[in-house]
Structure formats: structure tokens, C-alpha cells
């Protein structure tokens, strides 16, 4: 390989040359730090409020529907606007959208922290969702632009996905600490100094980039996508909350949202300048990676929901103790993200994602050994395997999806990935929650000494069963409490077995991904790079050189 260098970039074989308008080699990692910090704040806000709900309820006295919207306004609005702002960033500038998102997030955080009525808090949470929808796809699309070399990009995506996992998992722990020592508004107030720091740094450091799209931006298509995703996610969330799937408030959003998304896809196929190039889904690697993200999030969020209920209601631990029990999952996810690039180069996307799913399924089966008594070491082992396996799966899926998408459609591809992430989370809560309820309720149908009316009320959830048991008192209350605990553990085991089956299905689906990592796609001397690359990288680079020589377009 020749010793040619450009723009001050000088590295060993396989390196990425400096691209005009993008940060030099050293600054790229500083940019990644800013992007990861941005994502950390957004991921924290997705879960940090959960632990503060009792304090919010006591202070603002919201009604049942208002409390539901306080919790759900952020993820619903964020999920519905990801495609809109991801594709808008491709047109007007990803950095511009990201900076506006920073500003909105800071303003909304201040509004939420000092909200004195439920309606103001709901509006603030919705505005936070708008800011989050601007930030999330922009961070991933800028990352795609800043790291054109796939090997460096794999390292960056590993850190990016690890930060997302850390934010979501540590949200309840941080929220519990803040609520315990301050007031509930502090869970929002911590965002303000972070945004005050990131906004000027991002404006100074982040590069501006746009896609290659021409022609007018499809406003109608963007609104159709937003309304469609909102309808589907809202319907799925209602179903996950225990609503009847045939209830009009659940079924209508699902049907209308699905219809709008179908019309959106048809519209994009017919337009000369589409928002999203739906032909990307014709690529097996792209569509498979998106499906794997949905399945992985389905398992992760559904299992976390059941695990939190188990730890708090069966083992009797406090919210802060529950958050601490989940920390091994977080640390394992960080380790998987940090080693993901090396693993991807060694085994390739197909084996990495498939093995990640298989490892997660094994972790789930380990957790079936949990009973009504605390086994901290068993729980820790299960969570470590779960975090490492799922993060490995998400890393390989995100890296394959983003590498398969053309650079000019990076914002749209990132939005699709993030929407899949949110949709998988919603489906996971709905599906695994329904399985849990179906397995739990029959065990309380006929508890000796307990009136049928009380048994029916206790069948709704373990928390409600405990309340009914306390009201009954005496032997009947003790019998109901014992039966509810046994039924919950039985339902937990059934849910875990269903999860393991879905994860093994994901392992099979991942076999459609490429066998080897195709690196250095846009380097003109890729064949020489393959000759001098480290042994672990040679097969992938050679395969790419052969395919590039045959005229096959590979990203």
C-alpha cells in the first residue's frame, strides 16, 4: 500500500482518509463523545420519571388518564416524530436539527421541573419528545457521516449503543436518588446544565452534513409517517396496559396507524424524491437488521418490566435496590459495546447477531430457575448474560443497518432504526405483558376462603392482589397473598419461556445477515488494504474487494 496521506491523516493500512468538511482523525472521537452525551440525556429521560410517579401523583393529584399521559407523552411523541426529523435533517442539515433539539430539550426540561399542574407537565413531556426526536436520529446519522470507515464506525456504534443501554438502565437508579433527596422536579432539572454545556460545544465542534436528496421535502409524507407511527405505538401501548385489543380506543389507532404507514410506503415508492428510499428494505441485510432490532427490544423491555415487578413485589426490594439489582445488566451491556467492534471483525454480522440472540435466550432460561426467594447470584448471572447478549445483538444489528444504508439517506435510516427500537419496546410490553397476565390470572380463580369478587380484582395484577389481601386480612388474606405470589412466579416462568422462543427465532432470522464484515467500502485501494490488514480483518476485506471488482455495490 502506498504511503500517501491527505489532510494530515496518516495511519496504517485500512485507514480512512480525511474527508473535506469532516473532523480530522483525532476530533472524530471528540465528536463521538458529544453525540454519546446527547444520547445519554435522551435515554435517561425515557425511564427516569418512572421512579418519580408516586411523588408526582402526591403533589399534582393527576387523574388516571392524566397520569397515563404524563408517563407516555414523551415516548409517544418521540417515536412518532423520528422519521419526520430524521429525514428533515437529511435535507436542511443534521447538525442544525440536533442543535434545535438541544434547545427544545432544555426549555422543556425547565418547564417540566417547575410544572404546577398535570396539563403543564404533559405539555412539557410532549415537548421533550419533540426534542428527543430531533436528537436521536441526528446523533446516529452524524456518526455515520463522521466515521466513513466501517471498522472505526463499528467502534463508534459500539460506544453509542452502550451509552443508550446505560442511560435507559440507570434512569430508575438516578431518579430514585434524586426523588429521595430532592423533589420530583429534579429528575428534569438535571438536563438543563447538560444542555447548556452541549449546545455551545456542539455548535462549535459538530460538522454540518446533508443527504443527497433533491427536490421539495415531502411534508404530507412526513405527517403521514408521524400520524401512522403514533397510531400504532398508541394502540400497542394501550394493549400492553391491559386494554382489550377489540376496544375502539385500542383497535382504531392500530388500524388507522397501520393504514397510514401502508399509504406512506406506497407514496414513497411513487415519488421522484422520496423521504425514505424504501428500496433499502429490499436489501436482506437492512431489513433483517431492522427486524432484529425490533425482536431484541421486544425481549429487553418486556423482560425488564416483568423483572422489576418480580424484584419489587416478590422479593420485596425498594425501587433504589431494584435499580441496583439491574446494574449488572448495564455493565454487561457496556462491555459488549466496548468489545463489539473486535467481535464483529472476528466473526462477522451473521454469527455475532445470531450468537447474541442465543446467549440472551440462555440467560432467560437461567432466570427461570428463580423462585419466590431471593437468589442474588443467580439473578446477577442471568442479568449479566442478558445484558451482554442483547447488547451484542443490538450492536451487530445497528452496525449492519447503518452500513447497508447509503450515506445520503443516513438520517432516514437512523430514524427507521430508532422507530424500530421504540416499536419493539412497545410490542414487548404489550405481548409479554399479555402472556404474563394470561398465565397469572387462572391461579386466582378459586382461592379457598376468598370471595369471587376479591379473586377477580386480585387477578388484575400482583400489586392489586396485595391490596385486596391487606383489606381481607386473616387467613383469607394470607391465602390470597400466597396464591398470588405462586401465580406470579408461574406467570414469570411462562413469560420467560415465550421470550426464549422469540429470541431463538431472532437467532434464525439473523442467518440472513452477511457472513463477513465488508470493510473499507469507499477506499480506492481496498485490495491493498486487505493485503496489509491484521489477520482477523483479511477475510472480510478480501471478500469486499472481490465483490467490488465484480461491480456489486456494497456500503
Image: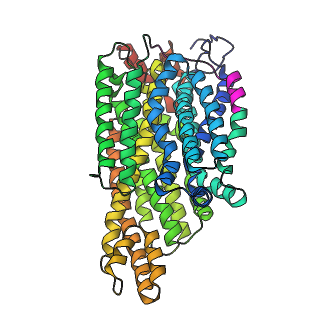
Nearest to the observer: residue 214 or residue 390: 214
Over which residues does the magenta segment extend? Answer: 198-213
Nearest to the observer: residue 98 or residue 413: 98
- Quarter of the image with the N terminus is top right
**Image quadrant in which you'd find residue 280:** top left
- Quarter of the image with the C terminus is top left
Q: Picture coordinates of residue 57 (x, y %)?
A: 57, 59
Identify the residue shown where x is 50% and y is 70%.
313
Left-right relation of 257 to 156: left
Residue 221 on the magenta segment? no
**Image quadrant in which you'd find residue 6:** top right
Q: Picture coordinates of residue 99 (x, y %)?
A: 63, 26
Identify the residue shown where x is 38% and y is 58%.
433
Nearest to the observer: residue 210 or residue 458: 458
In this picture the colour scheme is rainbow
Q: Picture coordinates of residue 360 (x, y %)?
A: 43, 53
**Image quadrant in which you'd find residue 342:** top right
Q: Which residue is outermost to the left? A: 246
The answer to whether residue 256 is above or below residue 444 is: above
Q: Can residue 219 be seen in this view?
A: yes
Nearest to the observer: residue 510 or residue 232: 232
The answer to whether residue 98 is above or below residue 105 is: above
Identify the residue shown where x is 48% and y is 61%.
307
Q: Can residue 162 be seen in this view?
A: no
Residue 208 on the magenta segment? yes
Left-right relation of 375 to 222: right
The answer to whether residue 87 is above or below residue 338 is: above
Left-right relation of 342 to 260: right
Amino acid at each position: 500500500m502506498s504511503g500517501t496521506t491527505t489532510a494530515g491523516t496518516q495511519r496504517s493500512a485500512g485507514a480512512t482518509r480525511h474527508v473535506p468538511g469532516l473532523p480530522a482523525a483525532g476530533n472524530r472521537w471528540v465528536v463521538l463523545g458529544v453525540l454519546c452525551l446527547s444520547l445519554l440525556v435522551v435515554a435517561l429521560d425515557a425511564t427516569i420519571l418512572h421512579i418519580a410517579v408516586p411523588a408526582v401523583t402526591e403533589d399534582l393529584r393527576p387523574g388516571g388518564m392524566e397520569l397515563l399521559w404524563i408517563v407516555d407523552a414523551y415516548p409517544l411523541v418521540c417515536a412518532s416524530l423520528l422519521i419526520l426529523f430524521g429525514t428533515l435533517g437529511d435535507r436542511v442539515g443534521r447538525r442544525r436539527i440536533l442543535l434545535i433539539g438541544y434547545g427544545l430539550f432544555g426549555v422543556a426540561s425547565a418547564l417540566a421541573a417547575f410544572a404546577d399542574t398535570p396539563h403543564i407537565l404533559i405539555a412539557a413531556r410532549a415537548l421533550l419528545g419533540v426534542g428527543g426526536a430531533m436528537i436521536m436520529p441526528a446523533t446516529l446519522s452524524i456518526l455515520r457521516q463522521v466515521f466513513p470507515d466501517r471498522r472505526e464506525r463499528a467502534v463508534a456504534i459500539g460506544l453509542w449503543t452502550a451509552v443508550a443501554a446505560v442511560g435507559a438502565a440507570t434512569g430508575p437508579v438516578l431518579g430514585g436518588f434524586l426523588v429521595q433527596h430532592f423533589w420530583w422536579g429534579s429528575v428534569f432539572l438535571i438536563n438543563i446544565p447538560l444542555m447548556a454545556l452541549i449546545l455551545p460545544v456542539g455548535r462549535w465542534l459538530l460538522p454540518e452534513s446533508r443527504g443527497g436528496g433533491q427536490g421539495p421535502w415531502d411534508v404530507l409524507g412526513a405527517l403521514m409517517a408521524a400520524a401512522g407511527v403514533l397510531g400504532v405505538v398508541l394502540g400497542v401501548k394501550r394493549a400492553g396496559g391491559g386494554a382489550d385489543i377489540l376496544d375502539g380506543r385500542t383497535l382504531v389507532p392500530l388500524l388507522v396507524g397501520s393504514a397510514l404507514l401502508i399509504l406512506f410506503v406506497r407514496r414513497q415508492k411513487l415519488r421522484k424524491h422520496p423521504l425514505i428510499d424504501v428500496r433499502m428494505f429490499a436489501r436482506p441485510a437492512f431489513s433483517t437488521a431492522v427486524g432484529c432490532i425490533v425482536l431484541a427490544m421486544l425481549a429487553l423491555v418486556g423482560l425488564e418490566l416483568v423483572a422489576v415487578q418480580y424484584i419489587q413485589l416478590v422479593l420485596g426490594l425498594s425501587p433504589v435496590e431494584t435499580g441496583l439489582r439491574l446494574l449488572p445488566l448495564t455493565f454487561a451491556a457496556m462491555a459488549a459495546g466496548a468489545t463489539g467492534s473486535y467481535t464483529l471483525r472476528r466473526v462477522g454480522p451473521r454469527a455475532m447477531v445470531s450468537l447474541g440472540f442465543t446467549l440472551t435466550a440462555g440467560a432467560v432460561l437461567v432466570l427461570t430457575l428463580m423462585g419466590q426467594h431471593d437468589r442474588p447470584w443467580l439473578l446477577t448471572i442471568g442479568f449479566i448474560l442478558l445484558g451482554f447478549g442483547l447488547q451484542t445483538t443490538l450492536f451487530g444489528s445497528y452496525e449492519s443497518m447503518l452500513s447497508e444504508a447509503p450515506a445520503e439517506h443516513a438520517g432516514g435510516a437512523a430514524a427507521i432504526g430508532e422507530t424500530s427500537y421504540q416499536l419493539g419496546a412497545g410490542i414487548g410490553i404489550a405481548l409479554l405483558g399479555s402472556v404474563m397476565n394470561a398465565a397469572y390470572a387462572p391461579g386466582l380463580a378459586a382461592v379457598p376462603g376468598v370471595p369471587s369478587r376479591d379473586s377477580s380484582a386480585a387477578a388484575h395484577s400482583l400489586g392489586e392482589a396485595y391490596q385486596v389481601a391487606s383489606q381481607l386480612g386473616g387467613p383469607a388474606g394470607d391465602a390470597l397473598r400466597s396464591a398470588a405470589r405462586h401465580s406470579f412466579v408461574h406467570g414469570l416462568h411462562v413469560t420467560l419461556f415465550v421470550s426464549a422462543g422469540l429470541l431463538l427465532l431472532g437467532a434464525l432470522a439473523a442467518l440472513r445477515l452477511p457472513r463477513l464484515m465488508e470493510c473499507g467500502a469507499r477506499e480506492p485501494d481496498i485490495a491493498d488494504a486487505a493485503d496489509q490488514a491484521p489477520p482477523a480483518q483479511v477475510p472480510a476485506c478480501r471478500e469486499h474487494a472481490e465483490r467490488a471488482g465484480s461491480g456489486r455495490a456494497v456500503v
